[in-house]
Image (spheres, helix red, strand yellow):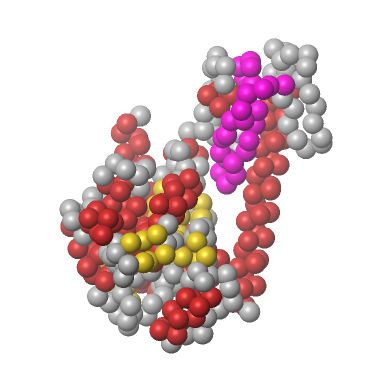
């Protein structure tokens, strides 16, 4: 029960942090709008205590991001420069609120690390499996642990865990796709791809970490990104992964994938000791790193292997910052 309780506590912590960010952003916006109230129309409506007051508008809501929250606000008809947490705002004459707020996300938002779980797992279980490694990364990244979009039937989960010689945990069990036709077709993988695309920030750098089936998905996203068919990824960490067997996806791995990558597998991993090295060979030699550690089908939490993962992630951010400064 301890891993489950830990996951619940972490979820509550993230919820409280998100709520605090939203309340802080609301108070800052309310104060700024009060100062700039002169050009506002008489029909400005007041909301309940703690909310933000805006002019009436029939336009669709605009979105802007704070460090760890997405806040929806109405579109303003006049021009305002509203400060928000962790952003630098410029005052410009624009008709759309979202165009006025300048986030400068490269220097003021945490980079995003999306961690993709394995077959039959959940995002919370992956967070627990990574343990101390994710604890180390949490202050430096906006960590996301999404659940795969497809439920794994109980009988499929039981068969998988029986093959692995393990007792299955309590449901739910998720999978990124359903493998059919002897693995030649990944049914529903497009939904998984769209889900991860929606999680990527508009400006801040993003890295994808995948474990097992999640590593296969992360590698496929990297292959698409290298071809310009998916948003840019600063790098991928592929733990116990492999090349997809689906025919249409395996074609993406014929040419070297030019995305910085770190390939990790355990020396005692019966599932990935052959597939993970083959996956590494599909990435550009000058941009790939490989790492073996004395473990099984798991994520290294501490020690030299975990330190190498952490160092790779920080190196990718340093490269991104250097490239950003050169273009500004």
Q: Can residue 158 be seen in this snapshot?
A: yes
Q: Is residue 211 left or right of residue 252?
A: right
Q: Quadrant of residue 163?
A: bottom left
Which residue is at the far bottom?
Answer: 165
Give residue 85's position: percent from left, percent from top: 60, 38
**Residue 70 is a magenta residue:** yes
- Residue 156: x %, y % from top left: 47, 76
Q: Is residue 163 above or below residue 191?
A: below
Residue at 45% across, 85% down: 162
In the orientation shown, which residue stands out farthest toward the front? Answer: 181
State the residue in front, 34 or 11. Answer: 11
- Residue 197's spot in the image, x, y percent? 43, 46
Residue 211 coordinates in the image, percent (x, y): 40, 67
Question: Which residue is drawn at the image coordinates 48% and 33% (left, top)?
Answer: 104
Q: Residue at x 23, y 70 (%)?
A: 277
Q: Quadrant of the N terminus?
A: bottom right
Prevalent SS, magenta region: loop
In the image, which residues are magenta?
Answer: 56-80
Q: Work out which quarter of the rendered image holds the C terminus and state it.
A: top left
């Amino acid at each position: 029960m301890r891993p489950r309780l830990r996951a619940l506590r972490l979820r509550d912590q993230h919820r409280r942090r998100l709520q605090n960010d939203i309340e802080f952003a609301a108070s800052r916006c309310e104060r700024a709008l009060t100062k700039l109230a002169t050009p506002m129309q008489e029909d400005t409506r007041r909301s309940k205590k703690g909310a933000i007051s805006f002019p009436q508008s029939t336009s669709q809501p605009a979105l802007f991001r704070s460090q760890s929250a997405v806040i929806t606000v109405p579109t303003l008809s006049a021009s305002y420069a509203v400060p928000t947490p962790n952003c630098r705002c410029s005052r410009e004459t624009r008709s759309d609120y979202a165009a006025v707020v300048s986030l400068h996300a490269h220097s003021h938002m945490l980079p995003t690390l999306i961690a993709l779980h394995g077959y039959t797992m959940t995002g919370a279980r992956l967070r627990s499996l990574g343990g101390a490694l994710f604890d180390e990364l949490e202050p430096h990244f906006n960590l996301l642990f999404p659940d795969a979009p497809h439920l794994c039937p109980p009988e499929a989960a039981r068969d998988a865990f029986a093959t692995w010689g393990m007792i299955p945990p309590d449901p739910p069990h998720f999978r990124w796709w359903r493998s059919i036709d002897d693995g030649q077709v990944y049914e529903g993988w497009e939904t998984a791809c769209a889900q991860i695309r929606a999680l990527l920030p508009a400006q801040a750098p993003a890295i994808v970490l995948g474990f097992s089936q999640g590593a296969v998905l992360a590698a496929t996203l990297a292959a698409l990104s290298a071809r310009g068919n998916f948003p840019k990824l600063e790098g991928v960490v592929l733990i116990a992964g492999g090349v997809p067997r689906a025919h249409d996806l395996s074609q993406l791995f014929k040419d070297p994938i030019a995305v910085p990558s770190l390939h990790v597998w355990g020396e005692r991993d019966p599932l990935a000791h052959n597939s993970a090295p083959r996956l590494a060979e599909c990435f550009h030699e000058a941009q790939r790193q490989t790492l073996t550690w004395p473990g099984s089908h798991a994520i290294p939490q501490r020690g030299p292997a975990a330190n190498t993962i952490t160092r790779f992630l920080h190196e990718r951010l340093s490269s991104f910052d250097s490239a950003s400064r050169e273009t500004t």
